[in-house]
């Protein structure tokens, strides 16, 4: 199983009054990692995969430890835990070596912007996602 790694910089404005990364900011970090995973690493050469829209149907976040500001980026590991006909679930860990700050998951639905409705995952997208599937996962047709 491959995991996508994203190096996420911390910004001074990410901190709350207690000097920790604000809980809402973690959603932004997850978004940055997800966009990097789905769009930058998706098949290229004019492929339409992941070039259309997508919507977030669900977020689930477990805050494990506070993360405080520093100059070094934090690592976000992402992988796929479920591929359905018209949705996928991405899992994440926001971490440093030996320390996990957040575990989270997001259900993403591909969206046809022109038709303004959800769409099915293409075979090309499914093939790309399959490389990042968690070992215990089975794909739905």
Image (cartoon, grey):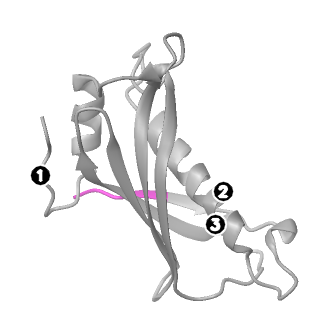
Identify the residue at horizontal 14%, vertical 41% (top origin). 140
Q: Which residue is mark 1?
A: 138
Return the x and y of residue 6 as percentages of the image width and height.
Answer: 53, 58
Q: Real-space Cα distance between discs 2 and 1?
A: 29 Å
Identify the residue at horizontal 49%, vertical 22% (top origin). 51
**In-front residue for pair 42/93:** 93
Label 3 near label 2: C-beta < 8 Å?
yes
Mark 2 falls on what kind of element? helix
Q: Which residue is mark 3?
A: 26
Return the x and y of residue 104 as percentages of the image width and height.
Answer: 46, 67
Mark 2 or mark 1: name the one nearer the start of the chain: 2
Mark 1 or mark 3: name the one nearer the start of the chain: 3
State the quadrant of the N terminus: bottom left
**In-front residue for pair 8/29:** 29
Magenta extent: 1-5
Identify the residue at horizontal 74%, vertical 68% (top origin). 10
Q: Is residue 66 above or below residue 110?
A: below
């Amino acid at each position: 199983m491959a995991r996508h790694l994203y190096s996420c910089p911390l910004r001074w404005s990410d901190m709350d009054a207690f000097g920790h990364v604000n809980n809402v900011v973690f959603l932004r970090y997850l978004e940055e990692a997800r966009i990097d995973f789905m769009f930058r690493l998706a098949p290229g050469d004019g492929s339409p995969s992941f070039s259309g829209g997508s919507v977030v149907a669900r977020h689930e976040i477990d805050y494990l430890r506070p993360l405080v500001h520093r100059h070094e980026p934090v690592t976000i590991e992402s992988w796929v835990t479920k591929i359905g006909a018209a949705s996928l679930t991405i899992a994440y860990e926001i971490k440093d070596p030996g320390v996990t700050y957040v575990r989270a998951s997001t259900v993403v639905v591909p969206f046809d912007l022109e038709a303004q409705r959800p769409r099915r995952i293409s075979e090309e997208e499914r093939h790309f996602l399959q490389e990042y599937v968690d070992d215990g996962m089975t794909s739905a047709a």
